[in-house]
Image: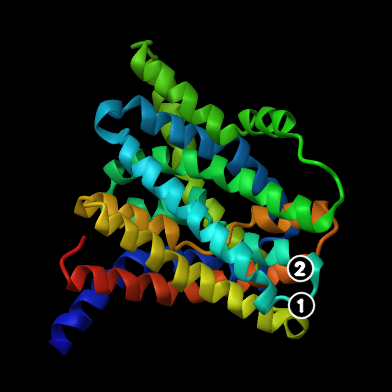
C-alpha cells in the first residue's frame, strides 16, 4: 500500500514538479541578477496582454466547443467558489482583528492563480484537452473572482458604493476574456485563419507558461514576513487545503467525470493570484499581508497540490 502511494505521489510530482522548478529558477535568476525587476515588469505585461490571450484564443480555435463547454461544471465551480467566499467572509472576524485586513485576508484565501499555475497544471496532467476545458472554467471563474474581490475590498477598505456597471465594463476589457471570446467566435463562425498567422500564434503561445512562471519566481520575496505571518498562514491554509476540499467534494457529489474532477481540483488548489496584491496596493490596503499570502501559498502549493493529486489518484477519482 505504501509503495503504491509513493508511486502515485511520484506521478503527482511529475505534474507539479516542472512548474515549480520554473518558479525556483526564476527566483535564482533574479537573485544572481541575470533578470531584473524591469524584465519581470515588461515580461508580465507581454504575457498578460499578448501571449496568454493568444494561447487561450488558439486553444478555443482548435477545440470542439461543444465538447468542452459544460454548463454544469461551470455552474458548479462558480457556486462552490461563492460558497467558500461566504464562509470566509463570515469567519474572517475570528482570525483577523484589524477590520481593514479582512478583505485582504478573504481575497487571498479564495482567489487562485488560474491563468498561469492553474492552466500549467491542467496542461501537464491532461495536455491540450486540459487547456481547452480549463480555459472555459477559468474565464467564468475569473469573472467571479473579480466581482467578489472588488466587493470584499471595497466594503472593507473604502466607504464608496459599488458601481456594478463600471465593474462589468472593466472586466469586458480584460485581455484574457477578449482572447477567449475571439477564439470562440472564430471557431463557431468558421472564420478561416491563414497558416502563417496560426504558426505565429503558436510561437507566441509557447512563450506564455515558461515566461510567466519565471516572473512568478522572480517576484517572490520573503521580506517583512513576521508582522502578518499568522493571518497569512491561516489564509494559505484556507486557500490550499480547506477551499479545494470543499469545492472538489461538491464536484464529486455532483458526479463529475475523472477529467472534470481533476480540473476542478487543480483550479481550486492553485496558489493565490498575483492580481490580488495589485488590487490591494491600488486601494491602499495592507499590501504586505497580500504579498505574504502570495509568497507562502506559492511555495506551499507544491506540496499540497502534489499530495491532493496523489490522494485522488489513489482512490481512482481522477
- Residue 186 lies, in percent from the top left, at 40, 17
For the point 27% across and 42% down, which residue is it? 129
Q: Residues within 10 Å of mark 2 (few under 14, many from 20)?
A: many
Quadrant of res 136:
top left
Task: Indicate whether 208 appears above or below 87.
Answer: above
* Residue beneath disc 1: 97
Marks 2 and 1 in Cβ contact (< 8 Å): yes
Is 233 displayed left or right of 83 in the figure?
right
For the point 56% across and 58% down, which residue is it? 85
Quadrant of res 161:
top right
* Residue beneath disc 2: 101
Task: Indicate whether 140 appears above or below 95.
Answer: above
Say which element carries label 2: helix
Identify which residue, 141 or 181, lies in the foreground. Answer: 141
Work out which quarter of the rendered image holds the N terminus and state it. Answer: bottom left
Identify which residue, 23 or 288, lies in the foreground. Answer: 288
Amino acid at each position: 500500500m505504501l509503495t503504491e502511494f509513493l508511486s502515485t505521489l511520484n506521478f503527482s510530482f511529475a505534474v507539479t514538479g516542472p512548474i515549480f522548478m520554473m518558479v525556483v529558477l526564476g527566483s535564482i535568476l533574479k537573485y544572481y541578477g541575470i533578470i531584473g525587476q524591469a524584465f519581470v515588469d515588461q515580461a508580465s505585461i507581454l504575457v498578460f496582454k499578448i501571449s496568454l490571450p493568444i494561447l487561450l484564443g488558439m486553444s478555443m480555435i482548435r477545440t470542439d466547443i461543444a465538447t468542452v463547454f459544460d454548463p454544469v461544471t461551470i455552474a458548479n465551480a462558480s457556486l462552490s467558489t461563492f460558497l467558500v467566499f461566504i464562509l470566509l467572509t463570515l469567519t474572517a472576524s475570528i482570525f483577523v482583528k484589524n477590520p481593514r485586513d479582512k478583505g485582504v485576508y478573504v481575497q487571498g484565501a479564495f482567489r487562485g492563480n488560474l491563468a498561469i499555475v492553474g492552466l500549467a497544471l491542467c496542461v501537464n496532467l491532461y495536455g491540450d484537452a486540459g487547456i481547452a476545458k480549463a480555459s472555459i472554467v477559468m474565464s467564468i471563474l475569473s469573472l467571479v473572482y473579480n466581482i467578489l474581490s472588488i466587493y470584499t475590498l471595497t466594503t472593507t477598505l473604502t466607504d464608496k458604493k459599488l458601481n456594478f456597471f463600471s465593474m462589468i465594463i472593466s472586466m469586458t476589457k480584460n485581455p484574457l476574456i477578449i482572447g477567449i471570446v475571439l477564439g470562440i467566435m472564430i471557431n463557431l463562425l468558421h472564420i478561416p485563419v491563414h497558416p502563417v498567422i496560426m504558426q505565429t500564434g503558436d510561437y507566441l503561445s509557447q512563450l506564455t507558461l515558461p515566461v510567466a512562471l519565471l516572473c512568478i519566481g522572480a517576484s517572490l520575496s520573503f521580506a517583512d514576513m513576521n508582522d502578518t505571518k499568522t493571518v497569512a498562514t491561516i489564509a494559505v491554509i484556507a486557500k490550499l487545503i480547506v477551499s479545494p476540499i470543499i469545492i472538489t467534494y461538491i464536484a464529486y457529489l455532483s458526479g463529475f467525470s475523472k477529467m472534470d474532477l481533476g480540473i476542478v481540483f487543480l483550479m481550486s488548489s492553485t496558489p493565490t493570484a498575483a492580481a490580488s496584491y495589485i488590487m490591494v496596493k491600488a486601494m491602499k490596503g495592507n499590501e504586505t499581508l497580500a504579498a505574504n499570502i502570495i509568497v507562502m501559498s506559492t511555495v506551499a502549493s507544491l506540496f499540497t497540490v502534489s499530495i491532493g493529486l496523489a490522494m485522488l489518484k489513489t482512490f481512482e477519482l481522477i
